[in-house]
Image: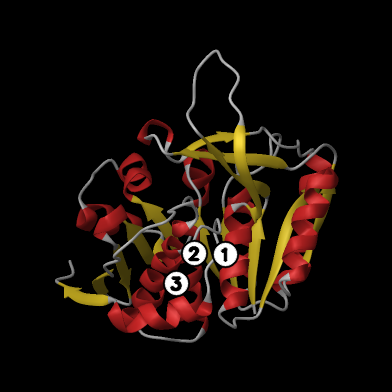
Amino acid sequence: MVLSVCPNPSIDTYAWLEDFRLGQANRISTQQEFPGGKGVHVAMALKETGVSTKLLAAWAGHSGTWIKSMCESLGITTTGVELSGMNRKCYTFLSETSSIQNTELMEPGPEMTRDDFEQFVRVFKKECENADIMVMSGSWPKGAPETAYQELIAIANEKEKKVILDCSGVQLEHALEVNVFGIHLNEHEAKQYCGTPDVQDAIDKLHEKVDLIALTKGKEGLYLSYQGKLVHANVSLEKVISTVGCGDCLTAGVAHGVSKGLGVEEIARYGAAFGAANCLRADLGMIYKADVEQLLPRVNINDLTYG
C-alpha cells in the first residue's frame, strides 16, 4: 500500500473569463471544482491505475469535508487530523486571451498548531505500519514546523519504509538533512537547491542523500537516476489541454513503478506516461487509466551515461 501524505489539501477551481480587466468587475462564465493539493492528486492517480493507496491529510471546515468526500467517492480511503478554519481554494483562471492563461490565485488556508502537528505525527506513525511506500507532497499549513517533512522522514527511516518526497523551499532544505529514498524536483527547484541548472551536477549533489531522483524539465521530460543508472523519458503529445497537476501525477507514476518493483527504465516510463496523461483532459490533477495505457508504449526511453 502507498500512503499519500497531503498536509495542505485544496479545492482546485477552474474559472473561465472572457477577459481579465484590472480595477473592473470580471464575471466568471464557467466554473469547475476538483479535489486538489499535490498529495490528493497523487492518491487519485494511484487509485485510478489500481494501486492500493490511503490519503493522510489535514482537513479543515466544510471545504475539507467536501475534498474528503470527493476523494472517498473515488474509492480512496482517507485519514488525518481536523484543523480549525477552512482548507484553501486555488483558482486557475483561463480565457481566450493568452495574457491570463493558467493564472493562479491561492487562498491562505488553515493554521496548524503544535498540538495539531503532533496529532498528525501520531496518525502518520500508525499508518506507516501498513504502508510499503510513503509519498509526501506539497506545502504545509501555516504554523507547521519548518522541519515537518524531516520529522516524518526520520520516522519512516526508523521503520525502514521508503519515502518519495515532492516539496520545495525550507521544507525541502530540512528534509534533505536526513536520508530519503526518493525525490521529485522540477528544474527550478533543483537549481534553487543545488545551485546549478546542469542535470548531472544536480543529480550528483542530490545522491549524497537520495537514492532515487526524478528531475523534470517541462516539455523536455523526465530524468530519472536510480540504482546507478540515469535515463531520460519523454512522450510527444499532439495537444495539451492542461498542465496543472502534471508533476504530481508524474510523482504518482514513479511511486507506481517503485511499488511494482520495476526497473529504472520502466519506472521512468510510468512516470512520463502518468504526467502526460494529465495533459490530455481538463480535469485538474486527474488521469484516466485508459490514457496511461495508450501512452505507455509511446514513451521514449534513452539511457544516458552516468557519472
Q: Identify residue for label 1.
A: 42
Residue 157, how many percent across, how many down? 58, 67
Residue 2, how many percent across, how many down? 62, 74
Q: Amino acid at mark 1?
A: Val
Residue 76 position (above or below residue 278): below
Residue 167 position (above or below residue 108): below
> For the residues marked 2 and 3, what is the alpha-carbon distance in whole angstroms?
9 Å
Pointer 2 or 3: first along the chain? 2
Q: Nearer the viewer, residue 237 or 265?
A: 237
* Residue 280 appears in view: yes
Q: Identify residue for label 3.
A: 254
Instruction: Specify the label residue 79 is tagged with.
Output: none
Q: Is residue 121 left or right of residue 104?
A: right
**Quadrant of the snapshot with the N terminus:** bottom right
Residue 128 position (above or below residue 242): below
Residue 119, how many percent across, how many down? 82, 52
Residue at x 60% of width, y 52% of height: 149
> For the residues marked 1 and 3, what is the alpha-carbon distance in whole angstroms?
10 Å
Q: Identify residue for label 2.
A: 249
Residue 63, how many percent across, how many down? 79, 46
Pointer 1 or 3: first along the chain? 1
Q: Nearer the viewer, mark 1 or mark 3?
A: 1
